[in-house]
Image (cartoon, helix red, strand yellow):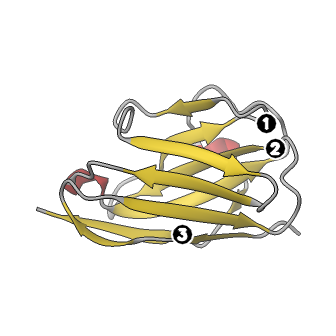
């Protein structure tokens, strides 16, 4: 049973930064891993996905502001959030898929395993 645990969320002012972490309970190997978020009253949306070879794809809304990375030796995936905006406020979730290449479209329906989420709140 794979378990994912997110941490690092918090409350910041617009323009601030946060670093989220996701710990996976098994060796991540070459799995596809990703970050998604869900704001109140909205559908879950993709933020960034990391292929098994380390290639990263971002949603247009976070390109050049967020940076996703992973460290296999630590069993962790990270999301650096810079220049945060009010509209980035959401619960952030990490996910994993037992394939090396993530689906091209950042569609949450392609993923079955999720962490419990960590809340990011950005105030103006």
| N-terminal-most mark, 2 or 1 | 2
* Mark in front: 2 vs 3: 2
In the depicted view, which residue is nearer to us: 51 or 113? 51
**Image: 84 above or below 110:** below
Quarter of the rendering containing residue 53: top right
Image spot of residue 67 (x, y percent): 48, 42
Which secondary structure, mark 3? loop
Q: What residue is shown with label 2?
A: 31
- The dot on residue 117 is 3
Q: Which residue is mark 1?
A: 52
Of mark 3 and mark 1, the one earlier in the sequence is 1
In the image: residue 62, left or right of residue 23: left
Name the residue rendered at 42%, 58% in the picture: 38
- The Cα–Cα distance between marks 3 and 1, rounded to whole angstroms, is 22 Å
The image quarter containing residue 66 is top left
* 52 relative position to 88: left or right: right
Label 2 to label 3, Cα distance in Å? Answer: 20 Å
Q: Residues within 10 Å of mark 1 (few under 14, many from 20)?
A: many
Residue shown at 38% from the left, 29% from the top: 60
Mark 3 Cα-neighbour bin, 10 Å: few <14, some 14–19, many ≥20: many
State the image coordinates of residue 3 (x, y, percent, origin top left). Answer: 77, 70
């Amino acid at each position: 049973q794979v378990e994912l645990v997110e941490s690092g969320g918090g409350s910041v002012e617009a323009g601030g930064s946060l670093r989220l972490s996701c710990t996976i309970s098994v060796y991540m190997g070459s799995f596809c891993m990703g970050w998604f978020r869900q704001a109140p009253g909205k559908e879950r949306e993709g933020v960034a996905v990391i292929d098994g070879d380390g290639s990263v794809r971002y949603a247009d809304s976070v390109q050049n502001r967020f940076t996703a990375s992973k460290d296999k030796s630590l069993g962790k995936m990270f999301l650096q959030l810079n220049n945060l905006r009010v509209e980035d406020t959401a619960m952030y979730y990490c996910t994993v898929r037992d394939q090396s290449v993530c689906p091209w479209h950042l569609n949450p329906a392609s993923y079955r395993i999720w962490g419990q989420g960590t809340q990011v709140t950005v105030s103006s």
